[in-house]
Amino acid sequence: MNDFERNYWSSYCDFIDLFAPLTYLGISIPLVSPYYVLIHENAINKLSDKALSKSIKTSIKKERDIQSHFEQRLNSYRKKVSQSKGKVVLYDTSLRIPELMLKEHFLPSETMILRQRSKNPKPPHAIPAAPFISYSKVNKKTISEFQTKAIECLNKVNFHPIYGDKKFRNRLVKIIPGIMHQISAAVHFFEKTSVSCLVLGTTNSSDTRSMALAASLKGVPTICLQHGIPMLEFGYLPKVADYLAVYGSYDVEWYSNKGVPLTSLKSMGHPRFDEIFKMNVMDKKAFQTHFKLDPSKKTVLLVIHHEETEIPKAIIQQMKGTCNLIVKQRNGKQRDSEKTVLLQKEFPDVSFADDMHLYNLLHCVDAVISYESTIVLEAMLADKPVFIWKLRSLVPSSTNYYEQLNDYIFQDAGTLVKSVTAALEADFDKQTWERKKTEFLASKYFAQTATSIHQLKALIQSLKA
């Protein structure tokens, strides 16, 4: 562990302890708060300072100690599993189980979906669904009292280098109403609903963590699917659910090294990746027509980041015209980031993927260029050569997930473009790439077949027995 990591995890534990009075309906507000978001862009810069440790009470010195320190703060929520009857509840934040897969593998009479948002298009399955927040019952006076209590806690640490930061203070007070509604919704949901198992897509957002803790307090077993590659560990720790369904043996070892018990780690891939092997993808001619591509040229998918667009811009400038180039933006709000919009305006004649399914894109292109995202793993599962451009803004806690692929990771656009061009022109050591890809997938993904959904169902059934 470096100073940044030690200070991050230690100050996180301090935050939970110092703001412990902010406990609502038996659930700690600081424990479910998005700590990384609270310190991002301001206090986070102080974490590399070795002297910061003088202001931190908790002392986490080894990576293996991370989970154990959080367990000290989670133990009071760990109730003996007492619920084996009731519905399997799927909470849809970052869950990403394909809709048709839900239809094939989950009975509507035994399953319920909790929607993060109230409005969703009609799905192909008949599983009953309800908006999560509709279970909330919090009055404005109570919220105001907790915000006042938060200010009192903040005033006690007014000169702390992190908690005394003005932006930190403002953000904490601002997020309290939303978190209280989420805690209320989670607690009241389990009071009203008989649940045999809760399946989550992450436990690192305040709504999902509220659900996981509320379930634990009721003795309901919980499973958390791995929502992406752990490029930054802050989005994947601490473990809050009873079981983590991870991609492969690498992730089992990674979590174990952070102090997570092996018995709670289940290697099973992810149901969304099953679609790579079984999805009926778009016909290549229809794909070419959709994007108005030149069928005589090779097609490359370029995956861009919402903040770092300097290298993608250089790649587009150098490759435009030499091949069919399709640019994939980030999903959600990040799709319309200021830098992404500027890039689209600068290159109006370049195709942008918009809402086309990623797996249609992967199956219909000849090569993929991406930053260090989960799409790199998905492209390899789809049997496509991948070239990675290095993000410059990764904080000092990068896990170097793609380290095995160093020969295909590039710091500058020019060298990357030369390698991609060589691959498109068949001047490419395909044998070496295939060997590297096979070795990488052997440790990173449990099986290259469409069986993850069956593994998940088997785990759910074992908890209901």
Image: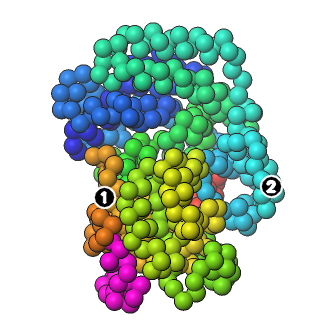
Q: How far apart are marks 2 and 1 (CA)?
A: 40 Å
- Location of residue 164 with respect to 417 vertically, above or below: above
Residue 400 is marked as 1
Total labels drawn? 2
Q: Residue drawn at (65%, 49%), measured in percent from left and top?
A: 92
**Going 20% across and 23% down the picture, which residue do you hit?**
54
Note whether residue 320 is visible. Answer: yes
Specify the amino acid type for callout 1.
Asn
Q: For mark 2, does the 10 Å Cα neighbourhood hold few (<14), some (14 to 19), or many (20 or more) residues? A: few
**Quadrant holding the N terminus:** top left
| Nearer-N-terminus badge (2/1) | 2
Identify which residue, 429 or 79, lies in the foreground.
Answer: 429
Magenta-drawn segment: 416-439
Against 118, residue 21 (above or below) is above
In the rendered view of the protein, which quadrant contains the C terminus?
Answer: bottom right
| Picture quadrant where residue 105 is located | bottom right
Helix, strand or loop at disc 1?
A: loop
Residue 140, compared with residue 273, is above or below; it is above
Left or right, 390 with respect to 117, comes to left
In front of the other: 97 or 67:
97
Percent coordinates x, y for residue 266 in the rendering: 47, 59
Q: Do the residues labelled 2 and 1 touch (CB within 8 Å)?
A: no
Residue at figure coordinates x 33%, y 34% from the top left: 44
